[in-house]
Amino acid sequence: MGRERLLDRVVVVLVRARNPNNIGAVARAMHDFGFRHLRIVNEYAVPFETARSAVDASDVMTGAVEFRSVAEAVADCTLVVGTTAVGERALQHPLLVLPDAAVKIGSEVEGEGRVALLFGSEKTGLSNDELSHCHWLLTIPMQEHEEIRHPSMNLGQAVAVCLYELVREAGGGAVSGVSAGADAGEVERLTVLLTELLEKTGYTKRHPANCDEAQIRRLVLRMGVTANDAPVWMGILRQVLWKVRREPTVE
């Protein structure tokens, strides 16, 4: 895996990060390892100027881009990986430990893909809806302690450890000829088309428990649609929808 390619194709996405100093610590870690693409998802503006911990990372902070939703923040990414401390959460995604995750991320980067690493709120992590945008999850293996039921790192530490592992893995061999996955924007368009098709055919009325938006998005992600196949699938769904719209509504 080429190091420079890795640094350019991996995006760090902070979702609902509240403490400017934690954001600054993330920027510092990114700067130290050479990563430069920071995206922040928040409902309100983050006062970057108060991020005192972003020592020597002004270039990362200046280039940081704010988004209103996870969907917008990862729209151009072909692989979206969520981070979790696991805890007592019932996971609905494949879970990889960090070293194994780094190998898969490297393969995606070499296959012309762009990877988003999602880190959630310092207090609550990523919500189930936010996780629904992820293809799979990674966790940092940590020593269990009796006095701490579910140990976890603070935000800056977690990002630093993940980025270090990616850089370390960059010393391995390259993977070529791999078709990049559909980016998250295409996944979202497929989700919208499939949802509309399910509604038009009456499936959502007969099986409402299977039709939550997050469930449909996870279903699309599990299909593993490539960038080449995404337009074909969208064309198929649009054609089916066109045909269904001409027929009487299914009750």
Image: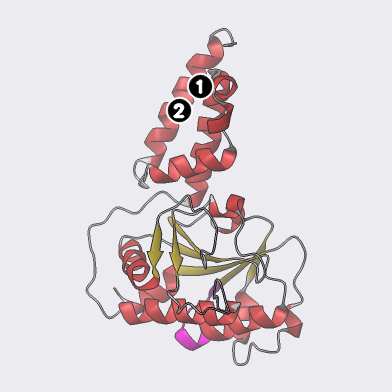
| Dot 1 alpha-carbon crowd within 10 angstroms: few under 14, some 14 to 19, many 20 or more | some
- Check if residue 210 falls in the magenta segment: no
In the rendered structure, find residue 241 and report the number of the disc placed on it. 1
Q: Are marks 2 and 1 in contact (CB under 8 Å)?
A: yes
Residue at image x 36%, y 70%? 102
- Check if residue 32 falls in the magenta segment: yes
Residue at image x 46%, y 83%? 34
In the rendered view, does 41 fall on the left or right side of 173?
A: right
Start-end of magenta stretch? 31-37
In the rendered structure, find residue 60 and report the number of the disc placed on it. none
Residue 111 found in image quarter: bottom left
In the rendered structure, find residue 237 and report the number of the disc placed on it. 2
Q: Position of residue 112 (x, y in %)?
A: 34, 60
Residue at image x 42%, y 74%? 141
Helix, strand or loop at mark 2? helix
As drawn, which residue projects farthest toward the front? 146
Residue 88, relative to residue 188: is it above or below?
Answer: below
Residue 45, relative to residue 128: is it above or below?
Answer: below
Residue 119, relative to residue 130: is it above or below?
Answer: below
Tally of marks: 2
Give, as a three-letter code, the residue at label 1. Leu
